[in-house]
Image (cartoon, rainbow, N blue to C red):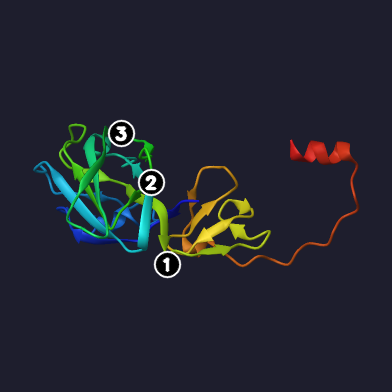
């Protein structure tokens, strides 16, 4: 299972101001995003350090849903990684065009060892700024542990079972798409309700449908 890996900023791209910091790329607040000043000078580069030992990167997640500023969302981007043994030796793993107002998962051909990740943004969709809602790096790394939620643990959208990853509270339900849940949304499981009388198979089937 991929975890959302913790990241440290090494090379900070230009920022519009204190309300649009690079850190917004990694937080959980739906109303925050990173944005450059007017008239960005391309290419714009972000370099991060993967703060997990022996990290293997398995996917990258881009969120271009910058409400009201869709034309400023990043468009053509390239991704490079460098190994722990030589953190300055970057190798390109992907080059692609991002759609506006979209959530995109980018999966390399195989997992790559990475101490650093460099994101280079070469263009946007024609707007006056350059912006991204989220940029996540998913993979496996020593030091990013799993905590099992007990059955019935309460999450924002109801009662479910799952796994919470400490480095970002990444929650995965079976084979479904990964969801990111803010820490404040997690609450202790309530006491298990008393068992009700057994129902017939027909009734149970109707309840599941």
Mark carried by residue 100: 3
| Separation (CA) of disc 2 from disc 1 | 18 Å
Circles 2 and 3, Cβ within 8 Å, touching? The answer is no
Rendered location of residue 177, percent (x, y): 51, 43
Instruction: Please identify the residue farthest to the front as the structure is shown.
Output: 85
Taking depth in this image into account, of 90 and 2 the one nearest to the observer is: 90
Label located before the other in sequence (1 or 3):
3
Q: Indicate the secondary structure of the residue bearing disc 3.
A: loop
List x then y, in percent, for residue 25: 30, 53
Q: Residue 42 vs residue 119: left or right?
A: left
Quarter of the figure with the C terminus: top right
Upstream in sequence: badge 2 or badge 3: 3
Q: Position of residue 65 (x, y in %)?
A: 34, 40
Q: Residue at x 30, y 56 (%)?
A: 24
What residue is shown with label 1? Answer: 143
Residue 46's mark? none
2 or 3: mark nearer the eye: 2
User: Is residue 206 toward the left or the right of residue 91 in the image?
Assistant: right
The percent coordinates of residue 37 (x first, y second) are 13, 49
| Element under disc 2 | loop
Distance between the alpha carbons at the discs numbered 2 and 3: 27 Å
- Number of marks drawn: 3
Instruction: Name which quarter of the figure residue 186 lies in.
Output: bottom right
Q: Tag 1's secondary structure?
A: loop
Quadrant hosting residue 187: bottom right
> Which circle marks residue 111 in the picture?
2
- The mark lying in front, picked from 1 and 3, is 1
Instruction: Establish if 186 lies above or below 79.
Output: below
Q: Are the two marked residues, 1 and 3, in contact with CB atoms closer than 8 angstroms?
A: no
Image position of 138 (left or right of 186) = left
């Amino acid at each position: 299972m991929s975890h959302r890996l913790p990241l440290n900023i090494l090379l900070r791209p230009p920022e519009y101001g204190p309300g649009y910091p690079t850190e917004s790329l990694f937080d959980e607040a739906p109303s925050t995003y990173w944005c450059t000043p007017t008239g960005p000078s391309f290419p714009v580069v972000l370099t991060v350090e993967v703060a997990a030992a022996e990290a293997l990167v398995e996917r990258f997640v881009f969120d271009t849903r910058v409400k009201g500023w869709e034309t400023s969302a990043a468009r053509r981007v390239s991704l490079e990684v460098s190994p722990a043994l030589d953190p300055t030796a970057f190798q390109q793993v992907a080059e692609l065009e991002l759609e506006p107002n979209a959530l995109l998962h980018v999966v390399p051909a195989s997992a790559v060892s990475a101490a650093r990740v460099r994101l280079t943004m070469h263009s946007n969709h024609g707007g006056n700024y350059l912006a991204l809602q989220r940029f996540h790096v998913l993979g496996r790394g020593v030091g990013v542990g799993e905590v099992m939620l007990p059955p019935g643990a309460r999450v924002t959208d109801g009662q479910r079972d799952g796994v919470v990853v400490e480095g970002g509270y990444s929650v995965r339900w079976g084979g479904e798409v990964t969801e990111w849940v803010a820490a404040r949304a997690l609450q202790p499981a309530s006491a298990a309700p008393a068992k009700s009388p057994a129902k017939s198979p027909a009734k149970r089937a109707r309840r599941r449908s």
